[in-house]
Image: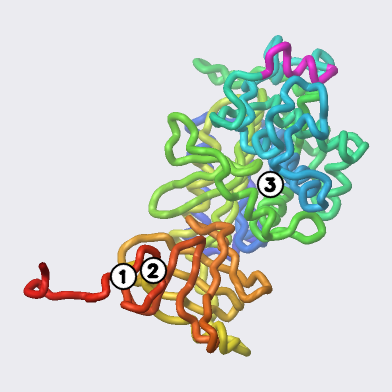
Amino acid sequence: MTTHETPEDLSLLPATRRALRHRLARAQSESRVPSLVAGVARDGEVIWEGALSALEGVEADGDTQYRIGSISKTFTAVLVMRLRDEGLLELTDPLEKHLPGTGAGRATVADLLSHTGGLAAEAPGEWWERSPGTLRPELADVLGEEPHRHPVGRVHHYSNPGYTLLGALVEEVRGEPWEKVLRAEVMEPLGLTRTSYAPQEPYARGWAVHPWADTLLPEPAHDLGRMAPAGQLWSTTRDLLRFAAFLVQGDDAVLGAASVREMRTPAAPSLPGAQESAYGLGTQVLSVGGGITLTGHMGSLPGYLAALLTREDEGLAAVVLANTTSGPLIGSLAAELIGIVAEAEPSMPRLWRPMAEADPQVLELAGAWYWGVTPYGLHYGADGGVELRPLKGVGRAARFVPAGDGTWRGLDGYFLGETLRPVRDAEGTVTHLDLGSFVFTREPYAPDSVVPGGVDAKGWRAAGELG
């Protein structure tokens, strides 16, 4: 067995490096994986890499290509979001508007991105992952005579044909093959030089491991043809860690921060049988307990397993790649690698700095507000945004960014996309805050407040004054 670590590992404490390596070694040994490579990055910089290879004369490292399966879907989703940001389509557009005649055109672009288009999970005919794409030369061969299994927009049902349609949509709008568009608009701008449509040396060959014997069988690696946007790509841990950083931070050369945040936001309900998971727009959203959320994607094809996960609050990302058909729970392994670093070496809190200049009209909004009788605090941050949060218990907290007209737009939580508007009287004094029709006042149920339904004229009373 050969092993590999890189100089970047020195950025972690020895105990953390050993814990990461031990977890990787245990996964390789227990699951009998021919080779297993992994990497962890913090704030876009690789801080640890590990690789294990059980085959004599076969090395593996962060530059070795593996097939990444359905992580390809996230790349396809980025292309679709670029079309949206350029004004060439809307996520609410039915597919039929841009790609007519498929038989699945009632589904919207957003439905397809979030797997709520009601389409079948797989293509008709023989097992598409183990057969050449030439068996499905046209979209009709991918969709079959009746592509739907559920009402459009009602059920989250993972669909590989749905992402084939999104790839065809990209080709229709751009007038170029999916592969060419992907290389020009994502791979080259992000510097993903080792991510490709077909394998490029050095790459790991795919294997099946006998369930009852320590023997191997080579797996086929077909060109998926029309199904390529759902699972064709090959990549490395280093390239995917760079891609993971983009999925958190954005890159204006490809897709801005607001759009990648939109991709990471749950767009479909929890998956049946997996109440702690949801799906965004081309990304999986996983809740792993303790208020921790991971986003990314998993992938598999015969001979290969892949996982890419990010944890935004710690600035961490992990990628794990294996050349086996089945074995380690690849997503759980990636999540555990993130957890090891986050627990042993949590990120340093950002240095607090006072704002360089404050807007007096915003500053006067800071402080306590009441929604009915529930106390909230409004904090004015150095970034120019505001945060509204309950002062006790749990409630509808949200961050807001300036909309440019004296109002703020909600960034998250219940008030995502809603408008926060200060309402002033004729003298310019703020009387209350209007947040999507919810009224926040400086006093709870003041007699002269504008609380909908009015306030009893007698005001607050003690027990002896009731009646």
Residues marked 1 and 2 touching at CB (< 8 Å) = yes
The span from disc 1 to disc 2 (Cα, nearest Å) is 7 Å
Work out which residue is located at the far right of the displayed protein and give it: 175
Residue 398 visible in the shown view: yes
The span from disc 3 to disc 1 (Cα, nearest Å) is 61 Å
Q: Is residue 314 left or right of residue 141?
A: left
Kind of element beneath mark 2: loop
Tag nearer the camera, 3 or 1 = 1
Circle on res. 455: 1
Kind of element beneath mark 3: helix
- Magenta region: 137-147
Q: Amino acid at mark 3?
A: Thr
The quadrant in which the N terminus is found is top right
**Residue where numbered disc 2 is placed:** 451
Residue at 80 percent across and 33 percent down: it is 97
**Residue where numbered disc 3 is placed:** 237
Q: Is residue 227 left or right of residue 22?
A: right
Q: Is residue 22 above or below residue 158?
A: below
Q: Amino acid at mark 2?
A: Val
Q: Position of residue 108 (x, y in %)?
A: 69, 35
Residue at 49 percent across and 51 percent down: it is 293
The span from disc 2 to disc 3 (Cα, nearest Å) is 56 Å
